[in-house]
Image (spheres, helix red, strand yellow):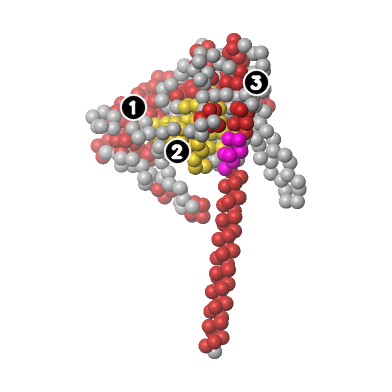
Amino acid sequence: MTVARISFVRVKYLFLTWLTVFVGGWVIYVQYSNYTELCRGHECKNAICDKYRRGIIDGSACSSLCDKDTLYLGRCLSTSPNNQVYTGGWGDVDGVIRCQVGEVLHYELGEEPEPRREAAVFDKPTRGTSVEKFREMVFNHLKLPPPLSTYSHLQSKLGEQANLASLVTQILSVADGNKDGHVSLPEARSAWALLQLDEVLLGLLLQERGHTPRLMGFCGDLYVTERVPYGPLYGVSLPWPLEAWVPSGARRSMDQWFTPSWPRKAKISMGLLELVEDIFHGNYGSFLMCDLSAGHFGYTDRHDLRLTDPRAIVSEDAFRRTMRALHCEKDDDCLLGADCRTSCDVAQKRCREEVTQPNLAKACRALRDYLLRGAPTALREELERQLYACMALRGSAGQMDMEHSLILNNLKALLWRQISHTKDS
C-alpha cells in the first residue's frame, strides 16, 4: 500500500513537471514568435544602409547609423510589424528610432507565403530634378488633397494656407542633412519619403512651440526623435486576464495611482491647454485632436507636456474632406479616430462636416480625473465647475470663438494662480 502510494505521488509529480515544462515552453515559443514578427529592426537597418551605400538616399543620421555605428537600436517598442519603433542612443543622447518596413503578408497554414511587398519609396524626386522643382513638389504635396482612395487614417494635407511657403523653406532646411546649404538628390529622396508619413509632418508643425519631441535626424524614412522620459500621461498597465474583470469605475481610479504631485500635474495640464490653443487657428490652419488617449502624451523632467504620437491630430481641412466622402446610416458611422465625431444626415446618407465637440471639451474630459485627484480643497469645487462647463461645449470652436476663449483662459488662469509661486512653474 505504501509503495503504491509513493509510486502514485511520483507519477503525479512527474506529470505536473511535464505539464509545467510543456506550458512554459509553449508560452516562450508564442512570446518569441510575437517578438520576431513585431521586432524587425535589423531588417530595417540593413535595407536603409544598403540604399545609403548605393547612393540612393542620404540624411543627417546615415553616417552614424551605417558607417560609424554611433546610432544604435536599443529596446524594441513596436506594436506593428510594418512600423518599427526602438529606443536608441546617438552618442550620449537618448532618442526614439522609427522606421517603416515592407508590408507583412499573412498566409494560411499549408499555403506558400507570398513575397513581402516593399514600400514604394526613394524613387522621387528623379535624377535631374532641380531644387526649385523639388520645392514646388513639396508645396503641392502639402496643399493639394489626394484622391479619395488614398486617404490615410489621419491625412495631413493642409489645403490653402498663407504660410505654406515658409513651411516649405523649413522642410528644405531639415532636408539639408549635412548643412552645406545644398539639398542633394539623395537627401531630397529621404525628405520626400518622410513627408509621406503624417506623424513626421505634423511633428514638424508642432515642434516649433515645443509640443512634440524634436526631430534629431533621419536616413531615408528612418528618423530619430528625442526621447520623452515619462509616458503615458497616466494609466496602469494590467495583465490581460485582469483587464476584463476590473470594473470601469475602479479602472479609472487605478489609472491615477502613479501620477506626479498635483502642482506638477497642473503644469502638465497647462501644456495640453496650450496645445489646444496653438492648434486652433494656428500658423498652418486649424487642427482637430482625434485621439486624446493618455498613451499619446508624455512629459519631460521639467514636467512639460509632449505629444508623442502626432497621428492623433488631423487638419480640419482634411477632416472635412474625409467626412464629405463618408456614407452613413447613423451618427456612430461618422467617426475619425477615437474622438472626432460629426452627425449623420440620414436623408442624404452623408456625414456632416462640422465636428460635434471642439478640442477643448475633449481635452477637459481627458484631464478631469487627472486634475481632480489630489486637487487642493480650496480649489476643487471651482476647478470641477470649470472642467464640467468646458466638457459641455458643443459644435466646432469656430462657431463659438468667444465662449471657447473665455473658458480656456479662465481654466489656464485658475491653474496658473495655484502653481505660479511654486518651483514647478
Q: Earlier in the sequence, mark 1 or mark 3?
A: 3
The type of residue carrying mark 1 is Lys
Mark 1 near mark 3, Cβ–Cβ under 8 Å? Answer: no
Q: CA distance from mark 1 to mark 2?
A: 20 Å
Q: Position of residue 56 (x, y in %)?
A: 63, 24
> In the rendering, which numbered label is found on residue 294?
2
**Picture residue at 62% right of the left edge, 19% below the top:** 145
Q: Is residue 88 magenta?
A: no
Instruction: Work out which residue is located at the far left of the displayed protein and give it.
Output: 421
Task: Specify the label residue 323 is tagged with.
Answer: none
Q: CA distance from mark 2 to mark 3?
A: 37 Å
Identified at 49% across, 42% down, the residue is 75
Q: Label 2 crowding class (10 Å Cα cut-off): few <14, some 14-19, many 20+?
A: some
Q: Residue at x 69, y 41 (%)?
A: 105
Q: Position of residue 191 (x, y in %)?
A: 57, 22
Disc count in the image? 3
Q: Can you tell which quarter of the image residue 187 is in?
A: top right
Magenta stretch bounds: 39-46
Split into 4 quadrants, where in the image is the C terminus? top left
Q: Badge 1: few (under 14), some or many (20 or more) residues near its Cα, within 10 Å?
A: some
Q: Which residue lies at the image location 61% right of the left edge and 45% below the top edge?
A: 37
Q: Amino acid at mark 3?
A: Lys
Query: Which numbered disc, 1 or 2, marks the residue that appears first in the sequence?
Result: 2
In the rendered image, the vertical position of residue 40 relative to residue 50, given as above or below: below
Q: Nearer the viewer, residue 180 or 193?
A: 180
Mark 3, residue position: 124
Q: Earlier in the sequence, mark 2 or mark 3?
A: 3
Residue 77 placed where, x, y %?
51, 41
Query: In the rendered view, would you say 319 is above or below 94?
Result: above
* Residue pointed to by mark 1: 412
The N terminus: image quadrant:
bottom right
**For residue 145, above or below residue 364:** above
